[in-house]
Amino acid sequence: MGRPESSAAAAVESPPAVKKNVRGLRTRKKLVDAAVSCFSEYGYAQTRVADIVFHAGVSQGNFYRHFESKEAIFLEALKPGMDELLSASSRSPETPRDPLDALIDRTNAYLISYAQNRRLLRVLREAAAMTADSDFARVWLDQRAQFIDRTRRWLESRHRAGAIGATDFELLAECLGSMVEQMAYVHIGLPERAPRPERVKAIAVSIAEVWFRSMPPAGAS
């Protein structure tokens, strides 16, 4: 007799728990969406938890049930844009292409992704600059390191294929990565309005052509 009663009790108790979990996920999403809007509009330093909960339409108590601090929700708000940016920079053409055309397409995809997340990426860079030992600096440096490492591996693969000569691939990747980062920040992140697609493409073409001209000629050592 005891077993059926326990099963019945579990069946009765389960739906409220599920509803509570769904409600919690919805609240968390509302908070993150509100945080994206606030950080994009006000910047990191000027955004308050009070601003986030006001835009989300929830209480401060609800905020602290999901996030321990403003820094914690900022890091979560950044994640989709960071993942998208890394994904865009790693896409390869489905069919073999002229190397320069392929590089232009990949650079353009990266810059388009940057433009879509430009306000938060600008805020991250500025927040990282406020203190070198912050979580923001670590997130920014980690994202940058992944991009540089991917570029280094691409350069090495071009060398193994006999397309370019030998050089310090780590240092060259740093130089090329810094150029992309600065161009994206200055020409896409900083302006009041995002550049039009044709302007983004023009920037991508210029970057890719500089990259291509920077490659050591085949046979160089």
Image: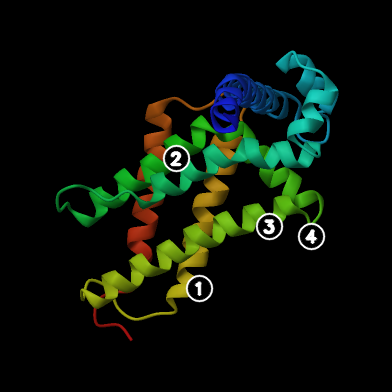
Q: Secondary structure at mark 2?
A: helix
Q: Amino acid at mark 1?
A: Leu
Q: Earlier in the sequence, mark 4 or mark 2?
A: 2
Q: Quadrant of residue 32?
A: top right
Q: Quadrant of residue 167?
A: bottom left
Is residue 37 left or right of 117 when viewed as pictured? right
Q: Mark 1 to mark 4: distance in Å?
A: 24 Å
Q: Which residue is mark 1?
A: 171
- In which quadrant will I find the N terminus? top right
Camera-side residue of 193 and 152: 152
Q: Visible in this render: residue 208?
A: yes
Q: Earlier in the sequence, mark 2 or mark 1?
A: 2
Q: Earlier in the sequence, mark 1 or mark 4?
A: 4
Q: Mark 3 to mark 2: distance in Å?
A: 22 Å
| As drawn, 144 above or below 79 | below
Image spot of residue 34 (x, y percent): 68, 22
